[in-house]
Amino acid sequence: MNDYISDLLARLKNGIMRRKESIEIPSTKMVKEVVKVLEDEGMIESFEELESGEISVKPLYTEKGEPVIENFIRVSKPGQRIYVTHTEIVPIMNGRGISIISTSSGVMSGALAKSKKIGGELICKVW
């Protein structure tokens, strides 16, 4: 497999649709960074690295059992990279979602990149 980010997003979406308590995802440095951003932004409850070389992600659900996040869109792909400047970063779903950007200062949310005035590769949008 070449695109671990697309695999991450597909596994999260499928696991959340099935209301799973934890979702196992193959671990790479980029996947860890994206999951860390999701945790920092309050989109997932937590994650931990397993001895098997995978990451176990616990999705976050509301008190009614509804998932906090439902939609994942992969923007930049291995065949076509999409780059944005800090002025091109826009709020996702009027602030209800986040964009994840790979910058020269690391992987971060779009809002943080915009506040630091850093552009980079637009990896995905989550809401």
Image (tube, rainbow, N blue to C red):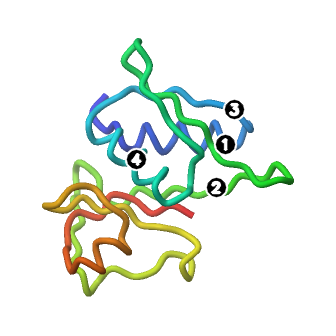
Dot 1 crowding, Cα within 10 Å, few <14, some 14–19, many 20+: many
Q: Which mark is residue 36?
A: 4
* 76 sits left or right of 67 in the view: left
Q: Residue furthest right?
A: 64
Q: Label 2, label 3: how many angstroms apart (C-alpha)?
A: 15 Å
* Label located before the other in sequence (4 or 3): 3
User: Looking at the image, is mark 3 or mark 1 nearer the viewer?
Assistant: 3
Q: Label 2, label 4: how many angstroms apart (C-alpha)?
A: 18 Å
The residue nearer to you, when weighing 78 against 122, is 122
Q: Which mark is residue 70?
A: 2
Q: Label 3, label 1: how many angstroms apart (C-alpha)?
A: 9 Å
Dot 4 and dot 3 residues touching (CB under 8 Å):
no
* 17 sits left or right of 37 in the view: right
Q: The C terminus lies in which quarter of the figure?
A: bottom right
Q: Which residue is mark 1?
A: 16
* Label located before the other in sequence (1 or 4): 1
- Residue type at mark 3 is Glu
Residue 78 spot, x, y in % from top left: 23, 48
Dot 2 and dot 1 residues touching (CB under 8 Å):
yes
* Label located before the other in sequence (2 or 1): 1
In the structure shown, which secondary structural element does the residue marked by tag 4 occupy?
helix
- Residue type at mark 4 is Lys
Q: Which mark is residue 21?
A: 3
In the structure shown, which secondary structural element does the residue marked by tag 3 occupy?
loop
Q: Label 1, label 4: how many angstroms apart (C-alpha)?
A: 17 Å
* Label located before the other in sequence (2 or 4): 4
Which residue is pictured at 62% across the width and 43% down the height? 59
Q: Label 4, label 3: how many angstroms apart (C-alpha)?
A: 18 Å
45, above or below 106, in the image = above
User: Looking at the image, is mark 1 or mark 4 nearer the viewer?
Assistant: 4
Dot 2 and dot 4 residues touching (CB under 8 Å):
no
User: Looking at the image, is mark 2 or mark 4 nearer the viewer?
Assistant: 4
